[in-house]
Image (cartoon, helix red, strand yellow):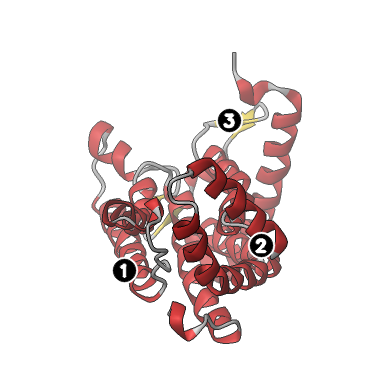
Amino acid sequence: MDIFAFPPIMAILDAAYGALTGLSALLEPFTGAAAAASAVILVTLFVRALLIPVGISQAKAEQSRAKLAPKLRALQKRHKKNPERLQRETMQLYKDENTSPLAGCLPVLAQAPVVGILYTLFLRTDIAGHPNELLTHDLFGASLGTSLVHMLTAGPFSLATLLVYAALIAIMIVVAEITRRVFRPTPVDDSPMSSPTMLRMMSALHYLTAVFAVFVPLAAGLYLTITVTWTLAQRVILRRRYPLPVSAG
């Protein structure tokens, strides 16, 4: 069964296809062959602008969690022999302070549908029964509908695709390294989340976007690159507006 033939999903894809092709047509006199890529960039910036309030809420929640660190350490010491009690008390503390340990997941979840739609639009040869003209567009000679993994494993080989992907992945890795260094998690004594293994795993997660990008069409990879760059810039600005306590820095 083709899930994309399901009428509601087909309607969403067709509407997104019409909007993106229409935007590409408007941009073509200014950007030429890169019109579709430019449209993807504008869509990305629009989505990120819509999510600015979410980013502000995230920064506030991060500030609140940092302020809670001493109380969390006290709970760890008081209930370290009773994990169930510790979990209940920890969640109650977050509830009392009107924050959540999972607040940082919201921007990722909010963007998932957009990434999914872009992935599908630049993957399928037809959308709602008509040919997918988006697949004819490229960025500096690299097809927007080709993933790096597909190009390397199934061909045909394209030097342009390799170079464009290399540039995007390099940007994502640099952004991930800056993010890892600047926004280190606040350790909590005796917490499993503060163990060396867990901290290494959390650091590695910063590079997950770059790994994921090699498997998706170039258009989705472009979206991810702009997203992580925007996110870093936004977090730097909001950290200045909502600084963490000195002891948590």
- The residue type indicated by label 2 comes to Thr
Q: Quadrant of residue 234?
A: bottom right
- The residue type indicated by label 1 comes to Glu
Mark 2 lies on a secondary structure that is: loop
Instruction: Please identify, in this view, whether the residue under mark 3 or under mark 1 is nearer the observer.
Output: 1
The tag on residue 177 is 1
Q: Nearer the viewer, residue 169 or 135?
A: 169
218 horizontally vs 51: left or right? left
Mark 3 lies on a secondary structure that is: strand
**Count of numbered marks:** 3
Residue 230 picture location, percent across and down: 51, 70
Q: Is residue 153 above or below residue 230?
A: above
- The residue type indicated by label 3 comes to Asp
Categorize mark 1 by other alpha carbons within 10 Å: few (<14), some (14-19), many (20+). some
Label 3 – label 1 distance at C-alpha: 38 Å
Which callout, 2 or 1, points at the residue further toward the start of the chain?
2
Dot 3 and dot 1 residues touching (CB under 8 Å): no
Label 2 – label 1 distance at C-alpha: 27 Å
Residue drawn 31% across the image and 63% down it: 173
Pointer 2: what residue?
99
Quadrant in which the C terminus is drawn: bottom left
Q: Nearer the viewer, residue 148 or 29?
A: 148
Which callout, 3 or 1, points at the residue further toward the start of the chain?
3
Residue drawn 49% across the image and 52% down it: 79
Dot 2 and dot 1 residues touching (CB under 8 Å): no
Q: Is residue 191 above or below residue 113?
A: below
